[in-house]
Amino acid sequence: GLRRQVDLGRDTAGQKSKSSTGALDDTTGWRALETHLHALAAFVDGNGGEYVTMEGSGVGDEELLEVLRSCCVDHVNRHVRAAGIAVLDRMISSVSSSGGEDSGQQLLIDPSSKLRVVVTAVLRETLADNWSQVRMAASVLCRTF
């Protein structure tokens, strides 16, 4: 799953590009992580507000939210950072559209909610990212939030 892909792509001394001495290869080591993140974003989006009430949804899953935070903030690859932000964006959209008495909207209001904590931490870092595509994804997340 997603955690396995993140672990496979961890920085190690052996992950240097063969074409440039000392340059970090920021693509091959990440395998399918970006694709997994885009698939997760599409899954959340496709389920809309129903995603919040699904058993095992990520909006309350601390491990998944921490993996997403790490992908958005710590990952060396800008495409992975932007894809992680897209997942959070779709989660926020899902929570916002869940409605009803038992809605997940409390996850956006409660300052101690793990989703809110992760989103604010991601926004704090990514709105000042070096790459414009990451800043753009963060801007979209900020508007959605």
Image (cartoon, helix red, strand yellow):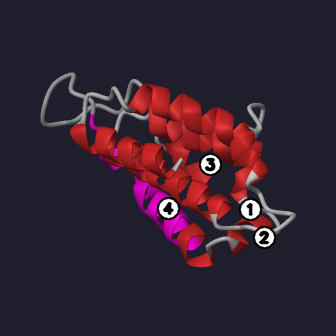
In the rendered image, which residue does mark 2 sit on? Answer: 54
Element at badge 4?
helix
Amino acid type shown at disc 3? Arg
Badge 2 vs badge 4, beta-carbon distance below 8 Å: no
Which label lies toward us, 1 or 4? 1
Viewer-closest of 104 and 5: 104
Q: What residue did someone put label 1 on?
A: 57
Q: Amino acid at mark 1?
A: Ser
The residues bearing labels 2 and 3 have C-alpha atoms spaced at a distance of 20 Å
Q: Position of residue 21 (x, y in %)?
A: 16, 24
Residue placed furthest toward the left: 19
- Give the residue drawn at x 44%, y 48%: 143
The tag earlier along the polypeptide, 1 or 4, is 4
Q: Is residue 74 visible?
A: no
Q: Residues within 10 Å of mark 4 (few under 14, many from 20)?
A: some
Q: CA distance from mark 1 to mark 3?
A: 15 Å
Frontmost of labels 2 and 4 is 2
State which tag comes first along the sequence, 2 or 3. Answer: 3
Which image quadrant for residue 97? bottom right
Q: Nearer the viewer, residue 123 or 15?
A: 123
Residue type highlighted by circle 4:
His
Mark 1 touches mark 3? (CB < 8 Å)? no
User: Dot 1 lies on which element?
Assistant: loop
